[in-house]
């Protein structure tokens, strides 16, 4: 018996695990890194030994108030146990511990950890950091990030909350002048937080300097009641993430000290003089962080959902492929593989690019601290595009996994509704996806202008290919190409072509008399296509580079199968663009499709072991269908029996309505 194969497991799943061509534990080590994997195991054991982290009942059966109370209880426990369970200086340990103890549907510290603390670290000056950071880390207060208003989320220039400086008292006056200026959406704002980063239009000496961040106390530290002039509450139930008390907030002429303004980049001097920042968007760094983090987050969702779908498809038998030979595991159907395996491949691709972008974020923040802001536009451009593409493809992928599990996939017990409703939030939060695609497109259009004017910018790994002259015809079926150079060149070609074409059209529309902005809007759909093509190229290149680094032959071969699937699946997804200008032929598309089907067949026998190697525990999956032991049916029945509706054989109001109605109908028919 091993970690992966145990007595009492579903025999169909055991059979799958036995036929893997590689060592699952070695694959898990490669995937996570040996040290991280060891720490994951230790942390998971720690949590399993502390039953107080268990939910009293499945969260699907809880009311919203019960959900929030349960999450709050576990959040406090998590903080109490953190120093014993993990090395709190290591982000990956904190994220894993938090995911195990608190799940993914939100917790009172979510925004405190993800946005408020990063804002303090990157936007507070030294004195402010000395005052706020130790208290924030020590949980002496809980803060959130209040930027979006009822009337404006995307267009930050039009935020209405004002912070007017009064030099006489050296205070800012915070005010919400209209209904639409009400802060609306911030996570944990409704009930949990007592402080917030608040974005407000800064006014001094009669002039508006645009949106700036302030650190504001919202509630009394002892009574937790809102402070005078502050109205705050929960915005109500949402599509998902209902464990989070996303909130609203209004200010009625609330005075806060001058030093409440974050002053690392821009400043207000005591007399009201404004000192501008070195780059106007440095105050947006917390948003950039979450956009970068979303890439790995979407990887986690996809890998979790494909784990559920693969395991369930191994134990679910339905129908025969060859008549008379017995019902097959539904994973044997090619259509099932085509639905699920590309999600595994995309999950792996997102994980690899997610690691890259977080490192780029960290490096850029260090550079900014040292006075070098040169990487800020590049980081912004690629993080916006990656966030938009991965959250959208992730959402589609999760839905494929759900549908691949038939009727049971529609149950809350499957775990899909939780994963899906949490994941799709990322298509909207931290910048609506279309808006983010268009931000990346701004960068691409600058590159196109440089190409057309023959003046390439300084070398940059992410966009250099735009300046290269690639092959004029697709070569994907021409040569033995273990590094998939010709597929990458096809993606580069498409990206270069759509970027230059949309640039030329922008120029042409302006020559016809349109303003730049109107021309931009007329080209917006194609601008988004340019970004998608650029992000596809980036994801694919990162995947190829990372697979090339793997030394172990048997593990590398599994990654190569996933890479083959990923690349040729993407070729089929963007085939219209590759065929449009005659770069790729119909025959080459057929070749790409064949490669997809070949890859599905190669992945099939390894699928269960591949998802095992992602090391996602039952506690994280929260899925009866995706249980490690594969014992789905008996546990579905147990799960249903926990439904609060089943506390009574006869519902208390039955006789009041249905019973009475049927009694009366029977009486009438006797008459
Ligand atoms: C571990 C954690 C994992 C996951 C998270 C889990 C849970 C968290 C869940 C939810 C939290 C959600 C939080 C939020 O949603 S907070 C609110 C987020 N709001 C937004 O994202 C608003 C979107 N809008 C914007 O960002 C900007 O307004 C927009 C980019 C659309 C335009 O900006 P603005 O109007 O201010 O500027 P412009 O004048 O148009 O542009 C000038 C120039 O500046 C460039 N720019 C814009 N933003 C940035 C930036 N952040 N960094 C660098 N550069 C930036 C822009 O591209 C222009 O450049 P150029 O083309 O050179 O002129
Ligand atoms: C789950 C969740 C959590 C959130 N958490 C927080 C939080 O903690 N703190 C916080 O401050 N905010 C938070 N938000 C708010 C979130 O950041 C905004 O909702 C988001 O930025 C989108 O802005 P919006 O709602 O104004 O959308 P809108 O801008 O109104 O979007 C509506 C439509 O208009 C389109 N559109 C808008 N502008 C343009 C444009 N320039 N070009 C093309 N199309 C455009 C969009 O693409 C979209 O299709 C959260 C939101 C959600 C859903």
Image (cartoon, rainbow, N blue to C red):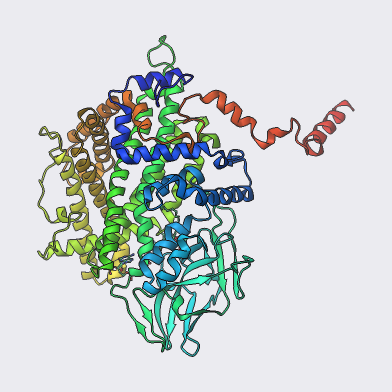
Outermost residue toward the front in this view: 84
Q: Quadrant of ligand 1?
A: bottom left
Q: Is residue 642 above or below residue 373?
A: above
Residue 643, by quadrant, is top right
Residue 173 percent location from the top left of the image = 51, 81
Residue 640, by quadrant, is top right
Which residue shows up at 44% across the image and 35% down it?
Answer: 617
Quarter of the image with the C terminus in it:
top right
Horizontal side of 161 relative to 278 (left or right) equals right
Outermost residue toward the right in this view: 671
Q: Is residue 120 above or below residue 44?
A: below
Asked if residue 525 shows in the view, the reply is no
Which residue shows up at 59% across the image and 60% down it?
Answer: 191
Outermost residue toward the top in this view: 324
Residue 144 percent location from the top left of the image = 49, 62
Asked if residue 233 shows in the view, the reply is yes
Q: Which residue occupies the foreground of this view, 433 or 614?
A: 614
Residue 582 percent location from the top left of the image = 16, 44
Quarter of the image with the N terminus in it:
top left
Horizontal side of 246 relative to 206 (left or right) equals right
How many numbered discs, if any?
0
Which residue shows up at 46% across the image and 81% down it?
Answer: 258
Q: Which residue occupies the foreground of this view, 393 or 287?
A: 287
Residue 273 percent location from the top left of the image = 37, 87
Which residue shows up at 45% across the image and 45% down it?
Answer: 85
Q: Is residue 608 above or below residue 148?
A: above
Horizontal side of 383 relative to 619 (left or right) equals left
Q: Which residue occupies the foreground of this view, 363 or 380?
A: 363
């Amino acid at each position: 018996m091993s970690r992966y194969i145990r007595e009492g497991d579903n025999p169909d799943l055991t059979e799958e695990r036995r036929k893997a061509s590689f060592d699952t534990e070695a694959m898990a080590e490669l995937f996570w890194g040996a040290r991280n994997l060891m720490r994951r195991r230790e942390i998971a054991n720690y949590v399993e030994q502390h039953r107080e982290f268990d939910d009293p009942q499945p969260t699907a059966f809880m009311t919203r108030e019960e959900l929030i109370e349960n999450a709050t209880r576990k959040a406090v426990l998590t903080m109490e146990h953190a120093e014993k369970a993990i090395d709190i200086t290591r982000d990956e340990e904190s994220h894993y511990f938090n995911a195990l103890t608190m799940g993914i549907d939100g917790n009172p510290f979510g925004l405190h950890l993800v946005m408020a603390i990063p804002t303090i670290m990157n936007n507070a000056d030294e004195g402010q950091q000395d005052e706020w950071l130790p208290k924030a880390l020590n949980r002496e207060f809980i803060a959130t990030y209040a930027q979006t208003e009822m009337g404006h989320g995307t267009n930050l220039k039009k935020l209405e909350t004002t912070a007017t400086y009064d030099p006489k008292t050296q205070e800012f006056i915070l005010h919400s002048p209209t209904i639409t200026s009400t802060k609306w959406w911030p996570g944990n704002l409704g009930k949990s937080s007592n402080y917030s980063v608040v974005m407000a239009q800064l006014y001094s000496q009669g002039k508006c300097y645009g949106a700036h961040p302030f650190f504001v106390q919202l509630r009394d530290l002892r009574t937790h009641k809102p402070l005078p002039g502050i109205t705050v509450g929960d915005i109500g139930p949402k599509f998902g993430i209902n464990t989070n008390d996303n909130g609203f907030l209004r200010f009625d002429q609330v005075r806060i000290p001058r030093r409440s303004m974050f002053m690392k980049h821009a400043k207000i001097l005591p007399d009201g003089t404004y000192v501008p920042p070195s780059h106007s968007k440095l105050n947006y760094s917390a948003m950039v962080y979450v956009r970068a983090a979303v890439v790995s987050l979407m990887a986690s969702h996809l890998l979790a959902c494909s784990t559920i779908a693969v395991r369930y498809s191994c134990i679910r038998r339905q129908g025969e492929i060859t008549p008379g030979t017995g019902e097959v595991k539904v994973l044997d159907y090619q259509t099932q593989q085509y639905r699920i395996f590309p999600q595994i491949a995309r999950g792996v691709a997102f994980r690899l690019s997610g690691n890259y972008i977080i490192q780029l974020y960290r490096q850029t923040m260090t550079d900014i601290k040292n006075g070098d802001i040169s990487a800020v536009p590049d980081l912004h451009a690629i993080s916006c595009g990656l966030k938009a593409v991965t959250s959208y493809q992730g959402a589609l992928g999760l839905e494929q996994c759900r549908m691949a599990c038939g009727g049971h996939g529609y149950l809350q017990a499957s775990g899909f509704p939780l994963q899906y409703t949490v994941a799709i939030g990322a298509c909207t939060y931290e910048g609506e996806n279309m808006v983010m695609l268009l931000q990346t497109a701004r960068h691409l259009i600058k590159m196109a202008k440089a190409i057309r004017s023959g003046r390439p910018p300084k070398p940059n790994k992410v966009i250099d290919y735009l300046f290269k002259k690639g092959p004029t015809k697709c070569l994907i079926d021409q040569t033995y190409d273990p590094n998939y150079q010709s597929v990458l060149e096809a993606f580069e070609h498409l990206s270069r072509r759509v970027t230059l074409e949309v640039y030329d059209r922008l120029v042409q529309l302006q020559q016809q008399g349109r303003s730049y902005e109107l021309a931009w809007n007329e080209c917006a759909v194609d601008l988004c296509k340019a970004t998608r093509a650029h992000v596809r190229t980036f994801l694919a290149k990162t995947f190829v580079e990372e697979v090339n680094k793997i030394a172990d032959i048997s593990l590398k071969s599994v990654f190569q199968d996933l890479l083959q699937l990923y690349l040729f699946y993407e070729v089929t997804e963007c085939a219209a663009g590759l065929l449009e200008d005659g770069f790729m032929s119909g025959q080459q598309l057929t070749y790409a499709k064949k490669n997809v089907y070949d890859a599905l067949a190669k992945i099939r026998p390894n699928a269960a072991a591949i998802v095992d190697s992602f090391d996602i525990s039952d506690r994280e999956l929260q899925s009866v269908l995706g249980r490690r032991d594969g014992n789905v049916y008996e546990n579905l029945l147990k799960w249903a029996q926990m439904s609060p509706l089943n506390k009574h054989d006869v519902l208390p109001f039955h006789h009041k309505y249905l019973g009475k109605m049927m009694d009366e109908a029977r009486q009438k028919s006797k008459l």
